[in-house]
């Protein structure tokens, strides 16, 4: 029993609660805001749609993790050509429970662009550095202990270095990560300093209350100001449980770039900018599968150890990331006996690929009967960069000794050497044949000082609705080109402290 | 047909179906409906495949069924795209089976146990201190804003 934590098992009847601030979502943004406010003595309630799953419950089972820790079994699909598979966490701790733990400060050029384009206040490098320093200390952000770096990462590093490319070791929020390669199914040692083991217990220790298995249906308001939220308890299997009502003077929405605009829209909250749910960036990713002669056993070592930064100016980040057998089987372009033959070499495989800082944007729209749907059309320019990122990744893998590679394009033949790769990619790759996925969704409630351009202001406040604050990657005015977690947390601390400074105006 | 032939061993096919049912239940409504439709389409679509002579997939022999699935997955239309998604989910379920994972040399539980032990043996005091700091009062926990940075994190831009 954890003090302050309530799960669906503890709830028999309807809930009617009251607090100063209700926070919707317990991921990087929500848990951070809750901890900051609770530490300042604010009465905080956190509502999380997903369940509470302890570190001890995490195993290497991919299917179980997808069903319990991810929204919709990790099977979200952005509709477009090509369609893009996306995944979001849905559990106490949110996506920080299932991400790779990469912790990078927002690039200075990105902050400058945001400040210039949107007129944002206090968002320069010097403004945010103290927050980054605090985060990095609290979440033990640092380099991997060397013994935890696996052979897949070492091979990709060797290939990239042989090409003369700039490579950086990953900075991750980890307290002596054991290198279990189990990041995407929940860290079984608790070494990854997700919100589940940091800001959530910190908030609870300061008196915050956390209700897991509670879905928020609407934000309530009166006279133009928010008054709280309503929702319901989620029973096993997604069944609707007792009703829930929370009266609060401030509502913080941190449900992620899909759910946050969806909740705001179904609550009847409109943005004069017309940007609510729009401006979605997804950082499209693709996977190159390379087969080596020797054993690699990529699952023995940290999930991701290095990043190739050579092509950041082109908006490309290259990494090697191990995939579990179910994940790999799901993306390989083979079936039956052929799939069995490819998977028999599982321990000789390295999976790597590009992340593209996209220039196109998509949107979130409600579809009757189906809920919020993501619509995203990859631009021709971004499709070209995906192909370029795939080519560079494959080049590095060949350089490291790969004997053949499979490319993430429908119908692509097996490629056995760099010349074949160049010949194949000399012709444009049809956009619809790209196999893409995303784990970084952002931008759907973008910040701008100008209410005609942005949904939220410099400090996450929803324009025109006092007491309503957004605290997740929806705030980003555009893609950041790297892993977004630390930026989300930094903005959450900054914006929570701003709220504390102004607590009198909200009677907190 | 989409899984390797070894699916016929023991009760694997039944367990893949169980896993598939669980997986389907956790997918978003749109995907659930689409994959359900893909299943029907794949099964009944075989009737239009000349060598099947009007039979559905479930009634075909191995050779004809394999030829049919190969022909469907080679197509580039939206229906084939849907069936490829279905194939992805089914093969994920197959490779979720522990004995299948062991056959390809993936047995993470003993490895996780070993490296978890190594972690505690190597860094125990540091880990304990780090975990205690999470809920420690502010003055004993993380440095407040404005405190000097620990380490020297590089900004990630050139």
Image (tube, rainbow, N blue to C red):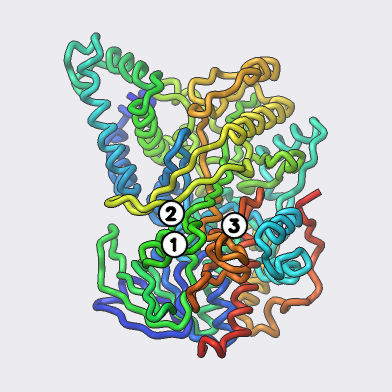
Question: Judging from the image, what secondary structure is the residue with disc 2 in?
Answer: loop
Instruction: Name the residue rendered at 25%, 14% in the picture.
Output: B49
Q: Are marks 2 and 1 in contact (CB under 8 Å)?
A: yes
Position of residue A73 relative to residue A427, above or below, is below
Q: Nearer the viewer, residue A268 or B82?
A: A268
Residue B79 found in image quarter: top left
Residue A51 found in image quarter: bottom left
Position of residue A439 relative to residue A17, above or below, is above
Q: Are marks 3 and 1 in contact (CB under 8 Å)?
A: no
Task: From the image, tell me which residue sits under label 1.
Answer: A91
Residue A301 in picture, x, y percent from top left? 63, 46
Q: Which residue lies most toward the left here?
A: B54
Residue A415 in picture, x, y percent from top left? 61, 19
Question: Judging from the image, what secondary structure is the residue with disc 1 in?
Answer: loop
B19 with respect to B146 (left or right): left
Instruction: Name the residue rendered at 77%, 42% in the picture.
Output: A167
Question: Judging from the image, what secondary structure is the residue with disc 3 in?
Answer: helix
Task: From the image, tell me which residue sits under label 2.
Answer: A70
The residues bearing labels 3 and 1 have C-alpha atoms spaced at a distance of 24 Å
Is residue A245 among the parts visible in the rendering?
A: yes
Instruction: Name the residue rendered at 39%, 56% in the picture.
Output: A68
Closer to us: mark 2 or mark 3?
A: 2
Q: Chain of mark 3?
A: B
Q: Chain of mark 2?
A: A
Circle nearer the N terminus (2, 1): 2
Give the number of the disc on residue B116. Answer: 3
The local crowd at label 1, few if under 14, some if 14 to 19, many if 20 or more residues have their Cα within 10 Å, is many
The residues bearing labels 2 and 3 have C-alpha atoms spaced at a distance of 25 Å
Position of residue B67 relative to residue A134, above or below, is above
Q: Nearer the viewer, residue B34 or A149?
A: B34
Q: Chain of mark 1?
A: A
Is residue A2 among the parts visible in the rendering?
A: no
């Amino acid at each position: 029993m954890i003090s302050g934590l309530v799960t669906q098992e503890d709830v028999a009847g309807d809930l009617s609660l009251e607090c100063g601030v209700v926070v919707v979502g317990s991921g990087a943004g929500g848990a951070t805001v809750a901890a900051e406010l609770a530490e300042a003595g604010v009465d905080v309630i956190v509502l999380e749609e997903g369940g509470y799953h302890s570190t001890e419950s995490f195993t290497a089972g991919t299917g179980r993790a997808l069903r319990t820790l991810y929204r919709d079994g990790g099977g979200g699909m952005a509709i477009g050509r090509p369609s893009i598979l996306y995944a979001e966490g849905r559990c106490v701790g949110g996506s920080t429970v299932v991400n790779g733990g990469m912790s990078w400060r927002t690039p200075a050029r990105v902050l400058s662009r945001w400040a210039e384009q949107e007129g944002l206040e206090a968002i320069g490098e010097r403004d945010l550095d103290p927050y980054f320093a605090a985060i990095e200390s609290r979440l033990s952000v640092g380099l991997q202990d060397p013994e935890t770096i696996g052979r897949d990462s070492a091979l990709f590093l060797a290939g990239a270095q042989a090409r003369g490319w700039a490579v950086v070791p990953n900075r991750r929020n980890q307290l002596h990560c054991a290198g279990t390669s189990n990041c995407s199914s929940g860290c079984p040692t608790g070494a990854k300093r997700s919100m589940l083991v940091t800001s959530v217990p910190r908030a609870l220790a300061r008196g915050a209350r956390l209700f897991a298995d509670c879905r928020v249906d609407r934000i309530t308001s009166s006279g133009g100001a928010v008054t709280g939220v309503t929702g319901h308890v989620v029973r096993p299997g997604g069944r609707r449980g007792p009703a829930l009502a929370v009266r609060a003077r401030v509502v913080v929405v941190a449900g992620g770039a899909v759910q946050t605009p969806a909740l705001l829209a179904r609550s009847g909250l409109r943005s004069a900018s017309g940007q609510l749910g729009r401006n979605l960036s997804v950082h499209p990713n693709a996977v190159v599968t390379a087969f080596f002669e020797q054993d690699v056993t990529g699952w023995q070592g940290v999930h991701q150890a290095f990043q190739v930064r050579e092509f950041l100016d082109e908006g490309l980040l290259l990494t090697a990331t191990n995939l579990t057998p179910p994940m790999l089987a799901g993306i390989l372009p083979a079936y039956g006996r052929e799939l069995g033959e490819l998977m028999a070499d599982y321990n000789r495989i390295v999976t790597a690929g590009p992340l593209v800082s996209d220039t196109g944007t998509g949107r979130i729209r409600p579809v009757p009967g189906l809920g919020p749907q993501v619509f995203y059309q990859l631009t021709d320019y971004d499709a070209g960069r995906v192909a370029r990122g795939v080519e560079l990744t494959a080049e590095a893998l060949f350089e490291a000794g790969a004997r053949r590679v499979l490319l993430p394009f429908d119908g692509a033949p097996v490629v056995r050497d760099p010349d074949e790769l160049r010949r194949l990619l000399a012709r444009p790759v049809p956009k619809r044949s790209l196999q893409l996925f995303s784990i970084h969704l952002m931008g759907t409630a973008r910040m701008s000082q100008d209410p005609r351009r942005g949904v939220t202001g410099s400090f996450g406040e929803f324009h025109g609705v006092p007491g309503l604050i957004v605290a997740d990657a929806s705030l980003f005015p555009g893609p950041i080109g790297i892993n977004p977690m630390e930026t989300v947390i930094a903005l959450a601390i900054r914006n929570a402290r701003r709220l504390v400074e102004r607590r009198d105006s909200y009677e907190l | 047909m989409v899984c390797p032939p070894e699916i016929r061993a023991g009760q694997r096919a039944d367990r893949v179906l169980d896993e598939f049912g669980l997986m389907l239940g956790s997918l978003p409504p749109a995907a659930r409906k689409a994959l359900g439709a893909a299943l029907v389409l794949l099964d009944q679509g075989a009737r239009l495949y000349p060598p099947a002579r009007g039979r559905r997939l479930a009634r075909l022999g191995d050779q004809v069924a394999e030829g049919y699935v190969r022909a469907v997955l080679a197509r580039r239309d939206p229906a084939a795209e849907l069936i490829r998604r279905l194939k992805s989910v089914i093969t994920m379920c197959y490779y979720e089976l522990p004995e299948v994972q062991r056959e390809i040399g993936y047995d993470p539980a003993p490895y996780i146990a070993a490296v978890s032990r190594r972690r505690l043996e190597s860094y125990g005091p540091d880990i304990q201190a780090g975990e205690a700091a999470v809920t420690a009062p502010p003055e004993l926990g993380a440095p407040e804003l404005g405190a000097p940075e620990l380490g020297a994190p590089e900004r990630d831009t050139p």
